[in-house]
Structure formats: structure tokens, C-alpha cells
Image (cartoon, coloured by chain):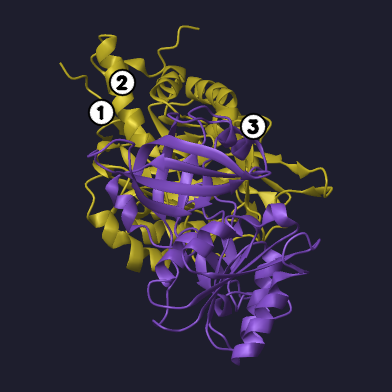
Chain colours: A yellow, B purple
Amino acid sequence: MKPDMSVEIAGLKLRNPVMTASGTFGYGEEFSQYVNLETIGAFVTKGLSLKPRAGNPTPRIVETPGGMLNAIGLQNVGIDAFIQKKVPFLRSVNTPAIANFFGYTPDEYAELAARLDSIPEVAALEVNISCPNVKQGGIVFGTDPGCAASVVQACRAATSKPLIVKLSPNVTDIVEMALACEGAGADALSVINTLTGMAIDLERRRPVLANVTGGLSGPAIKPVALRMVWQVSKVVKVPVIGIGGIMSATDALEFMLAGATAVQVGTASFVNPGAAQEIAEGMEQWLLDHGVGDVKSLIGALQA
Amino acid sequence: MQFTAMILNNAEVSPGYWRMRMTAPPEILTARPGQFVMVRVNPSIDPLIRRPFGVFDVGMHQPGYTGAAGQPYLEILYRVVGKGTGMLSSLHETDLLDIIAPLGSGFDSGPAGEEKLIVGGGVGLAPLYLLAKELVKDSPVRLFAGGRSKDDVLCITEFERLGVECYTATEDGSLGECGLVTKVLESRLDATGNQGRIFACGPHGMLQAVAGIAARRQVPCQVSLEGYMACGVGACLGCVCEGAGHSADTPDYRCVCSEGPVFEAAELKWEGV
């Protein structure tokens, strides 16, 4: 018998726990030739802002052992172009689309949340709180529990859709951040965003990335991500979405044991555009092979 | 499309430069000159990211016995610069590779009969061979190939076999003119009164010089760019280049993989042009 692969995130029903991570899957359409989008649980758009953003100078990416650094600079089409040019595609796909977004002030976050709330094709919202607050001289919403809570509260008041908050791992205590966001009204937490890192060109004695630092992703960060998913899911009541270096069905299932209700596949889609679909299929096969009837029975089932 | 290719041949054609032929589905025959492929060097996580290579050639490989069906093939020409290309050069006949192809835009051939001026520097010749094959069908084609030394000037015989008139230049004078290939290009433009259409691929400095020559002489010019990219399909946004109107206040980034890799030179920003 086919195992039950469905999971639920704050009322959003997913046919399976596999989503694609923001910034690694464009607006969905870019990958439609390589992935049957209706075989995955959901997909998350590139992070949206009120105004279009051009992004950083190049080089923006560099490969590192078992991973890559990126400093794209949140390049995106902006909310207006998203509605005009990207939403029609979302309508054509029978898979929930989750809109990732970010602002520079709590008011901007709230305005975006309200606008995304009014788009029927957007099934849920994922808030990126890991970007710098340029207004307040370097405060980063994602690393201060009070600031994070204020952003989440502002978004919460502006939308009745499932509100997912994506946490930064670049903090002393991610549990404190998770509790702050949950307390402010988050329906789910995405754990984790990229880890800040850098690469150096010895011969030129310069940083490889024009931005000097960038976000590390890929298999290299998986152990850190697993640990943080485990820590967070032990203390929060809302579902956790595990993210970080997932390349295979095995990786995804490990995140579920650690406490994740669903997972996001990121860098793997660059390496293999069909990764998310293959991971979902591989998870189902694992359940079949091991006589597990319901994927939900694995959530937090780690024996530790 | 994504497919598993079997290597048919992988040989060093000049010190540090390799040419690889691999099997491909019949759709590869529709690849346009200037398009590229993303190669996963091996199934492990090191190297993790695919490597982009211009399509050097496509065609039908004839197995070595009478009456056998032909096998569509894809060829890339690459230079060993790091870990990924080093591993690629160690692969053998019958080894398998995961390929995504063909990707990106191609060159626009322009009107038949017009003189076509192909300019390539080093491994930048890679996407220009398929272009030359296409162009010689209806136009006179001249190739200007440059490099540091004769070892960096690749596959000239192949171009000559197509009927392309080849000019070479090397910085150390070991082959052809001593100096930069752009000088040879300019001599030709002087002789024809700036007739023709330029197609260029090579190091950034060479492309910048060619773009400058094309702009000053008002000769149409397309360039094929390289970029650090993770996906090849316009999602990672790692490989952008600066459009002509780019400035810090009015950013204008173009995605090399999905909007290029071939651009009209005039559409891009060049220092000093």
C-alpha cells in the first residue's frame, strides 16, 4: 500500500513534505521543464520586496568544499511585477506557492504581507527576517529577538494566511529567536537560512565575492541545520520546516526525525533541477521499503 | 533537457586544452551556435556545482561498422583551470556524465553573403566552431584567433577545413602575428572599409577591445560571455553582467545564462568604450 506522504503546515495541506527553498527555484517557471511541479509539496518564490532590487555586483557566487557561497543581494522583480508577470504561472500549477518576502522596516513588511495576502494564488507567506535593517544603522531583524518579534507581529496583523518565519542561523541562540517568533504569531518556522561565510583568492589577496561575505549553503551546512532543527522543534509548538544541505531522500528523512514537519530543498536544485521531485519520490520509496505507512510518524521520532 | 551522456572521446588537443565528444539525444542537433551546456563532473558533492561549457560541435557519430545507425554527439572544448575541469580531463571513453543542454541564447547569423568576422581568444574559440559551420553555408567567414602562445590557439585546422580563412596572433609571436588578435581584426576592417559582422568570445580584456573597435567603426558585434553560475537556467542570478546603462544608482544587470550568453556588444557596459 502506498504510504501517506501528506503533511500540514498551519492548515496548508501538502501532498508531501518536500518544498523548494526561496532563491533557488526562481518563481517556479524556470524549472518547470525539469521538474513536474505537481509531484512536490510546495514551492517558495524568490524573496520579494516592495520595489524591484537589482542585487549586488559580481562575483556573486563561488563554490566551496561541499557547498557554495552566494551574495546575490536579494535581486528580485518587486511585488508589482510579481503580480503581473509571475502570478499567472502560479495559477496554472496545482501545487501551493509560498511567497517569500522581506522589507527594511516593520511597516514595509506589513505592507508586503497585506499585498500578498490579497493574492489568491499565494497559499502562504514566508518572511525573511535575515536581511539588514538599513534604516536603523545595521540592526538585523533576524538576530535580535525583539526586532524579529516586531516584524512578525506586523506581518501577523496584515495576513490571515499561514505565516512562516525563516530563521537565520547566524545567532548565538536560535531557540530564543524561534520562541520570539512563535510568541509573535508565526504559524511555522523555516530553519535555517544560509550561514555567513567568505572565500579568499590567495594570489589576488582579495575576497572572491564582490560583497566580501556571502551565505553558505549546500551539504556543508547540513549538520548545523540538523542540530538547529532539533533544538528548535523540541521547544516550539508550531511546525518546523527543515532546510540546509538536503541533497537526497535520506537527508530529508533525517530532518524529519530531528523534528521537521516538512523540508525545503535549495542548492540541490541548482546541481540537479529535478532534485525536489527525486527526493519526494525517494522518501516514498524509503517508507515503502521500511513498512512505514505515514510520513508524519517520522516527525520528531529521533530516539535521543 | 537533462540527459546522461557517455563519453566517446576525451583528448588533449593542446597543452592544457581538451576536447570531449559524448553521446546525446537527437534533440542536441537543434542546438544553436553560442548555446551552452551544464556538466555535472561527477555524482559526488565535490565539485558540487555544474560547470558551463559552450557547445563546440554537434553531429552524427558513425560507429565503425557498415550499416550501423549513427549516434548524435555533443562536443565541448575546455581548458583545465581547476578541480572540476581537472577531473573532467581524467575521464575516459564510456564514462558517464550528467548534462543539461542546450541552454541560453545563440548567435544571430545576420544576412547571407555578408562577411563574417569571428574573433576568438584561447578557449573562447569553443562556441565559435559551430557558429563557423553555420555561417560558411551562406557567407564568407574569416577567423581571428589569438592567444598567449601557439599552445593557446586551438583547432585552427578544423576551421580551415570548413573553408574559413584563418588569421592568428600570439603575444609571444610563436604563431602568426606577434601581438594582439584585435590588431589583425582592425587590419581587415581597414581593408574592407568596416564591412561585415563581428562575433567574439574570449577573455574579458579581448572582448572589451573588440567591443570598442566595433563601436568606433560602427560594425555590428555580438559577444559570448562567461559567468560564475550555479544553475544555468536563470534561477540563481549568480552570473549577471552589467548592461550598457548600468550604474550604482541605476542598476542594469543581465543574466548571462538565461538572457545570454550571447549579447549585442552595444547592449553591455564596457570600461572605456
Circles 3 and 1: CB distance less than 8 Å? no
Q: Which quadrant of the figure has residue A211?
A: bottom right
Q: Position of residue A42 (x, y in %)?
A: 32, 41
Q: Which disc number belongs to residue A6? A: 1
Where, quadrant-wise, is the C terminus of chain B in this rendering? Answer: bottom right
User: Horizontally, is B104 left or right of A148 in the view?
Assistant: left
Image position of A223 with respect to A62: above or below = above
Looking at the rendered structure, the secondary structure element under dot 2 is helix
Task: Give the class, few, some or many, for how many residues have Cα within 10 Å of label 3's Cα (few <14, many ≥20).
Answer: few
Image position of B44 with respect to B193: above or below = above
- Foreground residue among A247 and B136: B136
Identify the residue shown where x is 47% and y is 66%: B132
Q: Which residue is mark 3?
A: A65
Q: Which residue is mark 2?
A: A296
Q: Which residue type does callout 1 highlight? A: Ser
- Foreground residue among B1 and A179: B1
Identify the residue shown where x is 26% and y is 25%: A5
Q: Which quadrant of the figure has residue A291?
A: top left
Is residue A266 at all visible to an observer of this figure? no
Q: Which residue type does callout 3 highlight? A: Pro
Q: Mark 3 or mark 2: which is in front?
A: 3
Measured in 3D between alpha carbons, the distance from the residue under mark 3 to the one under mark 1, in whole angstroms, is 34 Å
Looking at the rendered structure, the secondary structure element under dot 1 is loop
Identify the residue shown where x is 36% and y is 29%: A279
Query: Mark 3 vs mark 2: same chain?
Result: yes
Identify the residue shown where x is 21% and y is 46%: A94
Measured in 3D between alpha carbons, the distance from the residue under mark 3 to the one under mark 2, in whole angstroms, is 33 Å
Image position of A287 with respect to A222: above or below = above
Q: Which disc number belongs to residue B251? A: none
Measured in 3D between alpha carbons, the distance from the residue under mark 1 to the one under mark 2, in whole angstroms, is 8 Å
Circles 1 and 2: CB distance less than 8 Å? yes
Task: Give the class, few, some or many, for how many residues have Cα within 10 Å of label 1's Cα (few <14, many ≥20).
Answer: some
